[in-house]
Amino acid sequence: MLYFSNRHGALHAEGVPLATIAARVGTPAYVYSTAALQASARAFRAGLAPIPRKQLAFAVKANPNLAVLRLLAEEGYGADIVSGGELLHALAAGMPAAGIVFSGVGKTRAELAAALDAGIGQFNLELEEEGVVLAALARARGTRAPAVLRVNPDIDAGTHAKISTGRRQNKFGVALANAAAIYARLAMLDGLELRGIAIHIGSQLADLAPLEAAYARVGALVAALRAAGHRISHVDLGGGLGLAYRPGEVFPTPAAYGAMVARVTHDWDVTLMFEPGRFIAADAGVLLTEILWVKPGAVHPYVIVDAAMNDLARPALYDAFHDFAAVRPTGARMTANIAGPVCESGDTFAMGREIDAVRAGDLAIFRTAGAYGATMASTYNCRALVPEVLVDGDRFAIVADRVTPAAKLASQHLPSWMNSVEPAASPRRAA
Ligand code: LLP
């Protein structure tokens, strides 16, 4: 929050007044802080100081902006990717291929081939057949694919159901009970260099206990695999460390997480891999918006902002809380609902929340929007795709353009069997 703070009565991103960015770029717009990204990347790494051998891979899905990835590459982070598109982004940002880990439950053959050709560091296999296909692709290239097997530990991570991934009914990984047999079969394939296990039980975890329980199950599996003669050199512990979205919320720190990991894994003798996304990016971004109207409501007034669920989907999807603050707070407060212009009641950021008093024309921000914000944006209601701005001290740059409805329209085509639209022929003009 330090990086988006009030200076002389107005919110700034580092040294830049948010009003300056709104005037130059327009709203809505995501604004990221370089210093905040660096601070969280360093805090996460520092928390893992007790871990002797480790690799950090930023979960690109949290924020695939090229400049953000570039910055994290400079911080020594690799990338955890889940698609060919994310591979493209990570490579374009200069992340070394060797530091790229390919997760994801539905990798296509074309994506596997592209990742092999790029020489990425590790494939996290989600099922046996994927390993067979990958091995064949690697053999055809005269190479061996470094891979680990993702297991599903059947642990409830205690987070929102839509972002829990480690329960047995979830689609991810292979059941723990089948893992050793699958591992043994995959280990015999020529095209694979099978070297360990991966796990990821969910996101925005508020409690270390489920993680610890899941890691303990992985530890038992590693011991069993070794007893069966397998060489285990890598274990990928996934991401998931949560952080406060509401003022006053308390979450485990990276240091507490690192201490737990060190304790549970002390005798594993492997390189540990980590895939943090949200922890690195969430607090480093805000969504800057303008208040369009304040209209009366049945119980509380509606503050209608120019950002909507297509720009920041998390409240509509997960009932997520994003703190709201006026860019020029007067000190007055109001209780209001906050909603966007999209034609759904789900396009609501808050109901009956006490907020800074705002009026039409004011600027405001939604905080903690740097992760799973812009990347989940859409053009629903034929709205523009929201732009992204990176601040560094007193300077800022547009790091993703606003994609206008006109540009989106230009990508559409009428089929040859329809008559093209002649503007002059429109009835109203003809009249
Ligand atoms: N590794 C794997 C295999 C994952 O599936 C994920 C997130 C991560 C790492 C990063 O997790 P993190 O450190 O960011 O918690 N759109 C949702 C979050 C979906 C997370 C999906 N997987 C949201 O806005 O809350």
Image (spheres, grey):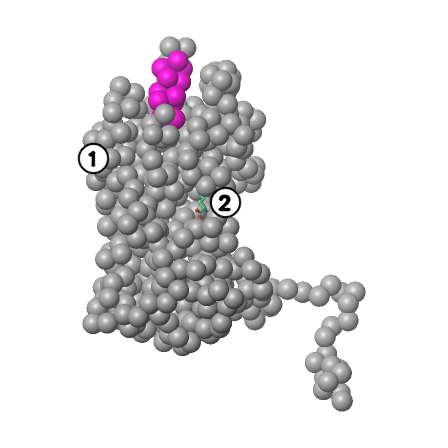
Q: What is the number of the mark on residue 49?
A: 1
Instruction: Name the quadrant containing residue 99.
Output: top left
Q: What element carries label 1?
A: loop
Queried whether the magenta region covers residue 217, the answer comes back as yes
List the residue tagged with mark 2. Answer: 84
Pick the front one: 246 or 176: 246
| Percent coordinates x, y for residue 23 in the rendering | 36, 76
Mark 2 or mark 1: name the one nearer the start of the chain.
1
- Residue range (magenta): 214-225
Mark 2 C-beta closer than 8 Å to ligand 1: no
Which residue of the protein is positioned furthest toward the bottom in this rendering?
431
Visible in this render: residue 408? no
Viewer-closest of 133 and 336:
336
Residue 407: say if magenta: no
Examine the residues drawn in magenta and state their main secondary structure: helix
Quadrant housing the N terminus: bottom left
- Within 10 angstroms of label 1, few (less than 14), some, or many (20 or more) residues? some
Choose top left, top right, bottom left or bottom right for residue 16: bottom left
